[in-house]
Image (cartoon, grey):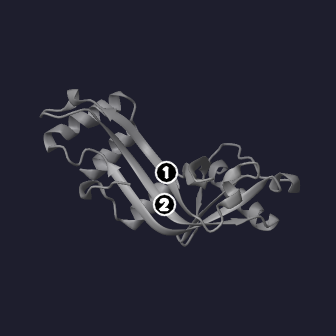
Amino acid sequence: MYVPKHFAIGDREEIFSFIEHNSFGQLISSVNDRPFATHMPFLMADDYESISGHIAKQNPQWENIHEQEVLISLQGPHDYISPSAYNSPGVPTWNYQAVHVYGICRVFNEPERLKVLVESLTDKYEKFRPNPWVADYHEAMLKAIVGLEVSITEIQCKYKVSQNRPEQDKNPIIEQLESNGSNRLANAMRGQK
C-alpha cells in the first residue's frame, strides 16, 4: 500500500487496537495465477505474531494457499471529503483508515484446533450481546471448513485523515463528517490533530 510519511502509523499498540476493532477484512492470495479475495473475520493471536480465520472447504482459495505469501486488508471508517468544507483551496478526496497485514499462510484442519478457533471468533462477537449465543458446533460443521493461520511478516498502517490539510480546514471537515453520520472517522481525525 502506498503510505506517505504523514499518513503512516507506526505505534504498535494503535495498530493492534485498530486490527482488534476492524477485524473483518479480505484475505488476498493467488488462485490459478489470478488475485483472489475472501471476505472474512480474523482473530489476532495474543502474541501478535499471527492472525487466523477459517474458510469453507468449497472455497478454492485454500487449496494452494499453504505456504503462500498472502495479504490481509482491513478497513476502518471512511468517507468522501468535499472541498466545500475547506477554508483554503483544495480538491475532493476520501479519508480512511486501513491496515495491510502480509504473511505466510498455513492451512490446518485438526478438529480440536478448528473448534478452538471457531469458538474464539464466536465469543469475540457474541460476548457483548444481551443474550450471547453459546457455540455448539457439530463435528460435521467443522469438517466443512479449513483453518488458516498467517505468520505475520509485515504490517502497514495508514490513517489518511486530513493530516496534510491546513489547520483551519480540519474542524470544518470534522463537522462535515459528523453531519454525514461518520462519527468514527470524525473521532479518528480528532485523534490525529
Relative image position of residue 189 (x, y in whole percent):
30, 45
Type of amino acid at the residue the image marks with label 1: Leu
Residue at the image position 49 percent from the left and 52 percent from the top: 73
* SS for callout 1: strand
Furthest residue toward left: 88
Relative image position of residue 150 (x, y in whole percent):
59, 65
Q: Give the distance between the C-alpha atoms of the residues marked 2 and 1, in whole angstroms.
A: 8 Å
Name the disc covering residue 156, or none. none
Mark 1 — residue?
A: 74
Left or right of 121, for residue 187: left
Total of numbered circles in the picture? 2
Q: Residues within 10 Å of mark 2 (few under 14, many from 20)?
A: many
Relative image position of residue 32 (x, y in whole percent):
63, 53
Residue at the image position 37 percent from the left and 41 percent from the top: 185
Mark 2 — residue?
A: 101
Mark 1 and mark 2 in contact (Cβ < 8 Å)? Answer: yes
Q: Residues within 10 Å of mark 1 (few under 14, many from 20)?
A: many
Residue at the image position 30 percent from the left and 51 percent from the top: 191
Image quadrant in which the N terminus is located = bottom left
Relative image position of residue 43 (x, y in whole percent):
60, 59
Type of amino acid at the residue the image marks with label 2: Val
Left or right of 41, for residue 153: left
Task: Please state which of residues 63 and 13 is positioned toward the viewer in this rendering.
Answer: 63
Mark before the other along the chain sequence, 2 or 1: 1
Residue at the image position 75 percent from the left and 62 percent from the top: 114
* SS for callout 2: strand
